[in-house]
Image (cartoon, grey):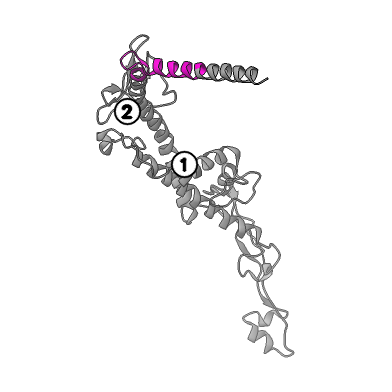
Amino acid sequence: RVITQGCVVNVAAHCSNPAGNASQSACSALTPPGTWIPATYHFDPTSVNVEVACAYNRVQQFLTATGATVSVGSATNMQANMAILYTLLLNLLSDSYGTKYIDPNEPSGADDYTEAGRSDVSFRKETQDMKKAIDDLIVAHGTYKSTISGHTWTGYFYRNTGTNGKTYLQCITGSTAGSDGVKSVNAEITTYRNTVKYRIREISNRIGYLNGKDTSSGGQAVSSEGGDVTVGAAGSGFTGYSFNGGNGYANTIYSHANFLAGKKIKLLEKILTAIADVDTIYDQITSKRSEYYEYNQ
């Protein structure tokens, strides 16, 4: 709640001789001429506290650290929690993190997922939307921060011109451009929270689970296009999305490793035998070298 105090007339403009109060020209036409005294102003004493939808202070509280200036593309000077989120978004959208990567083995029904962020394309889009919403808010906050810091309370007060010297309130409200950023961030944070939960579950389902060990902590169950995966119980083996004859990527990797190391092709046995053969060759070389050394003494 704030008091919005208008600047109103305190003492009306008048002539030093009341006979000329009608206008400045009437005052000057008197004999002798009067002196025209301009009006003076003050804050409206009848003003009362009113509710004002002003998000600026709230935005500054969760966006910046100690009211510092923040910039698009950097988490410097951000409030700690916002900095964590914004850094995550910057990383996820960077080329070094593979922002354009699409899992070649993504389930065929992924295009029809209804959960936000569950598919590879949807997750990238939601991440882009979240970052843009914060970027817009940073710009809006910076604009108002600069305007407030540049305000002066001294100039032009007595003449009631401009905003200088008057009761001053800068707000990101429903009627300003900055309000779009506030509304967008509020909406996107809610959406992105669910996006991350769906994504955790989706990736866990693709990798798979073993013997009831649920690795999708923090995830949220999915239902569209094939539905969710039952984690299973102790001793139940692998569960996960069907992939290359197995249940999840982990199942397939395990099967291949087991095949290579197992009795069928005896790869591990052959590797161990080869290592032993190398040791034998080394021992033979060492022995022959010793014999050669003794012979030539």
Q: Position of residue 257 (x, y in %)?
A: 37, 20
Front-lying residue, 36 or 124: 124
The three-letter amino acid code for the residue at tag 1 is Tyr
Disc 1 designates what residue? 97
Q: Which residue of the protein is positioned furthest toward the top in this rendering?
A: 235
Residue kind at label 2, given as amino acid type: Val
Q: Secondary structure at mark 2?
A: loop
Residue 26 image-quadrant placement: bottom right
On whether residue 194 falls in the magenta region, the answer is no
Query: Residue 267, how many percent across, how many down?
Result: 37, 19
- In the image, taking residue 63 as reference, residue 254 lies left or right, namely left
Labelled disc at residue 222: 2
Q: Residue furthest front?
A: 296
> Quadrant of residue 228 in the image?
top left
Q: Is residue 277 above or below residue 169?
A: above
Labels 2 & 1 near each other (Cβ < 8 A): no
Comparing 233 with 51, the one in front is 233
From mark 2 to mark 1, how far is it between C-alphas? 25 Å
Question: Percent x, y for residue 55?
Answer: 54, 47
Residue 269 is covered by the magenta coloring: yes
In the image, is 210 to the left or to the right of 55? Answer: left
What's the magenta bit mostly, secondary-structure-wise? helix
In the rendered structure, the answer to whether residue 20 lies left or right of residue 191 reads right
At 59% from the left and 46% from the top, the residue drawn is 60
Measuring from the top left, give residue 216's x and y in whole percent: 41, 24
Q: Residues within 10 Å of mark 1 (few under 14, many from 20)?
A: few
Confirm whether residue 213 shows in the render.
no
* Region of the chain picked out in magenta, as a range: 258-280
Tell me the element at label 1. helix
Q: Please say if 215 is above or below 73.
A: above
